[in-house]
Structures are given as structure tokens and as C-alpha cells.
Image: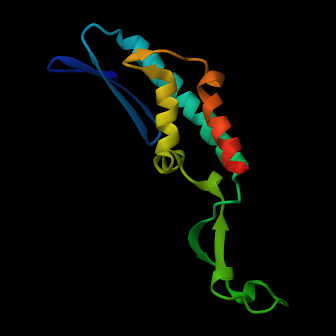
Amino acid sequence: MCSFIEYKDFKLVYRQYAALFVVVGIDQTENEMAVYELIHNFVEVLDKYFSRVAEKTQFSQPFFTGEVLHPSDHLGSPALDLLQQVHVLGPPELDAALQIMFNLDRVHIILDEMVLNGCIVETNRNRILAPLFVLDKVAES
């Protein structure tokens, strides 16, 4: 399977990770393999950041599955109101692609740290994520 497509005056370099496709358009003078590796590094940085976010906010943002718990499931306890009957799952149960979609501002910050004016300026994951960690600390306080 080829991950390079030529179209008119440029090439498309893409990689698929489960439900996530990353596509980059380049001109004829760019090195396809370097861009292919950039995509892989970008996805590794996303994975590192969003797995850390999921660990930190495991129960702070509830997501509802629609699975209803009935009052008979809790023998000996008082009757549950409608809100208490909904089973809540934390963000680790979400698909990674959904986390990326709901946090596009963070994805853009990561991309801005990696690429500037069309040139790769940073590949070190810790340096790329440093501004986001600062933003997260400010948001916590």
C-alpha cells in the first residue's frame, strides 16, 4: 500500500492510525519520507498529550452512554432519580479521534510548535508539549 499520491503540481503524503487519517500536501521538491516521519512524530506527540489528558481528567468530564441503571439494581437503597440512573463513563472510554476533534485548539498548538512557515522547527516531544503543560497548569489554578 502506497502512502504517497501525486496530484497536479503537488504530492499528498498520508498515514492512517485506526480512525485517524493525517494528510499533508507537499510540492515536488520536498522529501516524502521526511514528511512521512513528521506525520508519525506528530501522532506520537498527540498520543502522549491526549493520554496524559485522559489520565488527569478521568472523572472530571462525564460522558453518558445511555445505559440505564434501574432502582432494583441497588437493593436496600433509596429510589434513584433520573440523573442518578445514567451510567457515567470517563474520557478513557472515548475514542482518541474524538478527543482530538474536541480539542482542536490543542492540536493546533502542537502543530504550531512543530512546523513554522512550512519548515520543521521542532521534533523533540518534550519541547513541543511544554507550552501545553504550562497552559494546563494555568487552567488548573
The quarter holding residue 68 reads bottom right
Location of residue 65 in the rendering, given as x and y in whole percent from the top left corner: 57, 68
> Is the image coloured rainbow, by chain, by secondary structure, or in one colour?
rainbow
Please state the horizontal and vertical placement of residue 84, each as a whole percent of the image: 69, 81
* Residue 70 vertical position relative to residue 139 in the rendered view, above or below: below
Q: Quadrant of the N terminus?
A: top left
Q: Looking at this view, name the residue that lies furthest to the left.
A: 8
Q: Quadrant of residue 16?
A: top left
User: Which residue is located at x 64 percent, y 51 percent?
Assistant: 92
Percent position (x, y) of residue 67? 59, 74
Numbered disc total: 0
Residue at x 46% of width, y 44% of height: 104
Q: In this view, does 66 lie to the left or right of 130?
A: left
Residue at image position (66%, 43%) is: 136
Question: Who's the residue at 45% across and 15% down the image?
Answer: 120
The relative height of residue 4 versus residue 66 in the rendered view (above or below) is above
Direction from residue 3 to residue 136 in the image, left or right? right
Residue 8: horizontal and vertical position, in percent?
14, 20
Q: Relative to residue 52, is residue 89 depicted above or below?
A: below
In the picture shown, does residue 140 fall above or below 88?
above
- Of 2 and 31, which appears nearest the observer? 31
